[in-house]
Amino acid sequence: MLQFLGMLAAIGLTAMCWGMYGPVLHFGREDMHSPLRPFVCVGVAYFVIAVLVPSLLLLKGEKGAWTTKGAIWSLLAGVAGACGALGVILALHFGGKPIYVMPLVFGGAPVINTLLTAAMNKSFDQLKAPFLAGLLLVITGAVTVLVFKPQSPPPRPVAVAAVASAAASAEVAEVAAPAKPTVEQKAERLFAVLASIALAMVSWGSYGPVLHRGQAGMQGSRLRPLICIGASYFLIAVLVPLALLVPLGDTGQWNANGVLWSLGAGSLGAIGALGTILAFTLGGKPFTVMPVVFGCAPVINTLTTLALNETPLNAVSPFFLAGMLVVAVGAATVLAFGPRGHAPAKPA
């Protein structure tokens, strides 16, 4: 019983951290006006929390052992996590908002998680009608979330005196203001947002099953897979973006607020990764742990976004909330009726 409660606590920790990840990262990206610089900060946070700290703790000893198979699977899990973080940052960079980007990611990720788990366990024959119905609910809820996403609040009305005094400067600003995006530009931006969401969805959906293989390959170690994840993040989220800042002509800037928000997002991601490993250590499996995480995280994401933006509840469409509920129900259905793998054969 205590082990089960511990697993639930670890799942709750991951859902809480990953649910807050998107809104916090959005503030970092907005302050630095760059898709690459927040990514670097996320990688730095992962390196400190998932490499330096576990390496020091590992000196005291821990069960498990380093193995080539376990290290490769754990490194691949880190690659999946880093690519998912990049997808979220790109989606925000192309104009997406965390209040609907993250629910879409968390709605599709459990589907990818279950399908990949079924492929790795060779249990596609267990995909029954209730499971397919759950997939349909997830897709329907995700589309509803996208269609009825909360809009940005209108600008505050300017006082009459201020309007009169700023008339001349407004005329100049109107000449210098950029033209409104055309229909084609809006379509391209929407496609970029959806493609970035798909990258995050596939990457984070693959994260759990791949990490589970890595931990099993290291004989149940908790710290060793986390170190491999941090190493992958350091390579993909720190070294590569730093090398691309100048060639890609990044026009952003480093500033204290952006760095702190982005480091906070990276810390939430790394702690969430630790929660996932703890859940697996306490007996959880990818087809149970990850859908529950991805089902709860959108709710936390929405509440965090509303709180940070001080958005009134009456600005949120009931259809948007209904879409989130449908996504959560679909994820729970996928969890309940997903393939469990074949039972081991009885000895002769």
Image (cartoon, grey):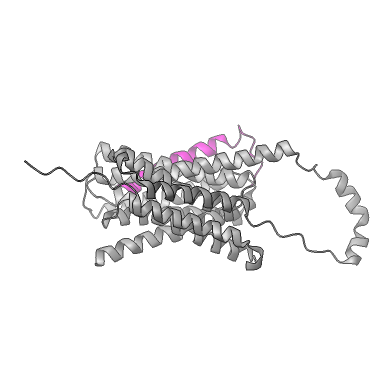
Q: Quadrant of the C terminus?
A: top left
Q: Residue at x 17, y 44 (%)?
A: 344
Q: Nearer the viewer, residue 153 or 245?
A: 153
User: Residue 63's spot in the image, x, y percent?
Assistant: 21, 52
Task: Looking at this view, name the residue that lies furthest to the top.
Answer: 247
Q: Is residue 125 left or right of residue 170?
A: left
Q: Looking at the figure, which quarter contains the N terminus? A: bottom left
Percent x, y of residue 270: 42, 53
Tell me: 24 left or right of 128. right
Quadrant in the picture for residue 209: top left
- Left/right placement of residue 152 relative to residue 347 reads right
Using residue 197 as the reference point, say whether residue 3 is left or right of it: left
**Residue shown at the point (57%, 53%) measured from the top left:** 145
Give the magenta-colored segment's residue range: 225-253
Which residue, as the protein is rendered here, is positioned at the far left? 348
Q: Main secondary structure of the magenta part?
A: helix
Closest to the observer, 222 or 333 = 333
Image position, residue 79 (x, y; %): 42, 40
Residue 71 appears in view: no
**Above-or-below relation of 343 to 332:** above
Residue 337 percent across, percent down from the top left: 34, 51
Is residue 166 highlighted in magenta? no
- Count of marks placed on residues: 0
Q: Is residue 327 above or below residue 205?
A: below
**Is any part of residue 79 visible from this angle?**
yes
User: Closest to the observer: 15 or 265?
Assistant: 15
* x 45%, y 41%: residue: 202
Q: Is residue 249 on the magenta stretch?
A: yes
